[in-house]
Image (cartoon, helix red, strand yellow):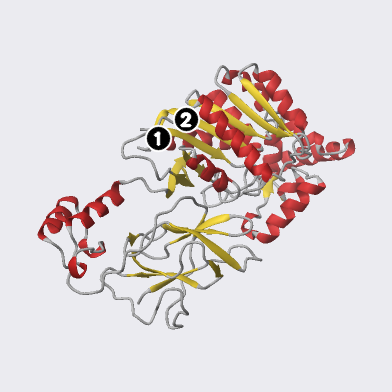
Amino acid sequence: MPTEVVMPKWGLSMQEGKINLWLKREGEAVQQGEPIAEVETEKITNVVEAPVSGVLARLCYPEGSIVAVTKVIAYITAPGEHLPDVIPNGSAEPAVLAEVPPLLVSVVASVPSTPPVRLAGPVRAMPAARKLAQEHGIDLSTVTGSGPGGAIIKEDVEQAIAARTAPQPLQRVQFYSAGYRLDGLLYTPRSLPPGERRPGVVLLVGYTYLKTMVMPDIAKVLNAAGYVVLVFDYRGFGESEGPRGLLLPLEQVADARAALTFLGEQPTVDPERLALVGISLGGAHAITTAAVDERVKAAVALEPPGNGARWLRSLRRHWEWREFLARLAEDRRRRVMTGVSTPVDPLEIVVPDPESQAFLNQVSAEFPQMRVMVPLESAEALIEYAPEEMVHRLAPRPLLIVHGDADQLVPLAEAESIAIRAGPSCRLDIVPGMSHFNWVVPGSAGFIRVTDRIVSFLQEVLPVHVG
């Protein structure tokens, strides 16, 4: 029986989504978990993954359609299975079909849709098409014929071969760091010619953030500029393995280095041209990783803290800081005696200003999957973390720091301290009116300002050579 693919509901207030792009054509084979459509809402952009393997038999809505949540947007059939004619494009769906919840991840890119679905029955193919399919291991039951009467011709098989060998615009990938399986998304420019290698960029998320927030929108911008991009969840967060919520900066740096290795192994990436872009704590990790790993040819840090103790101290009054240190000392004793660290809300460690608190409250309420408890052990590790003490090792490789003069969560003084220690190979771009979160909305003036600066910097120091 055909399987429904429905418009997902991943935010609590989400009522509808816009189908920006279809990533697969009608009649194409899909694998379970493979991205098939880009969906956009007011706050974030995500993709719908295929809930089962089979043939994408029908796309129910054209690109640009706004569809209510839980409405069927596509059908997947088994190879050779006939999709009943009573299911027209864009119409109401029969209730007898089982609802299968989609899997969600963030995404970029598309392919056009139009080819008709081949009906069930014997595969009709021209001899040249059969021979070519056999030579390349192509299952003709997954190929849509464009010849007379729907027969499969040689050109149809050639297209199937090209589709199989061409880089996918989005892949869900996995790699390992210290034995933990990390979950990531690999974005490849659709215009990338076969065999061509491009510079690769690893995006590093901030404090307790997940790969599906903000970073996919930056990945889309970098993809459009020609870069191959990888974003991933650190160990213990999101869909990666590891002790849940345990945030140790140097372990996250190790994860970033593993991501560099994985990205450099991709056939679409030039391993001699790798860069890092990180936000907030991820920006600090970009600096530290580049300082210890010479494979990084350029780094971008957005609103990074340079010294963990100074940063966390700046968020508290004097007596609050003394109480916090006493609390950490007690937790250290407890860890030694019991092996257990006290779990706390992450905002007990990084205390937000009112504007940041309002933004984070909204995100947490809208996306409960973001909520996580962090052990006080992580706070002690953050206090001991000082990327500014290592930044000089990055020179003479270029470093761009982008920081807002209105940032109250990570004060501008943090970026200025890093820049002074980095030397002349560092550029500090201070953005008037930019706070820690007021720029992250895709399409906003702040987002465009920041991403344009990233792209222009990378194009200068790590240009994309096309052709």
- Disc 1 marks a residue whose amino acid type is Val
* Residue at image point 48% right, 39% down: 177
Q: Is residue 183 above or below residue 93?
A: above
Query: Quadrant location of residue 411?
Result: top right
Residue with the mark numbered 1: 269
Of residues 305 and 467, which is closer to you in this image? 467
Q: Residue furthest front?
A: 148
Residue lying at 72% horizontally and 57% vertically, measured from the top left: 362
Task: Say what secondary structure mark 2 lies in.
Answer: strand
Tag 2–tag 1 contact (CB < 8 Å): yes
Circle 2 residue: 274
Q: Residues within 10 Å of mark 2 (few under 14, many from 20)?
A: many
User: Relative to 5, is 331 above or below?
Assistant: above
**Residue 237 visible to the viewer:** yes
Q: How many marks?
A: 2
Rendered location of residue 145, percent (x, y)? 23, 64
Furthest residue toward left: 127
State whether residue 441 is above or below residue 60: above
Quadrant holding the N terminus:
bottom left
Question: For residue 294, which numbered disc appears in the image?
Answer: none
x, y percent for residue 92: 47, 80
Residue occupying the point 60% across, 18% down: 425
Residue 462 appears at what percent x and percent y? 49, 27
In the picture provided, is 34 more to the left or to the right than 340?
Answer: left
Left or right relative to 309: residue 266: left
Amino acid bearing label 2: Leu
User: Around disc 1, counting alpha carbons within 10 Å, would you say few (fewer than 14), some (14 to 19), or many (20 or more)?
Assistant: many
Residue at 73% of width from left, 51% of height from top?
Answer: 359
Residue 52: % across, % down = 38, 65
Say whether disc 2 or disc 1 marks the residue closer to the N-terminus. 1
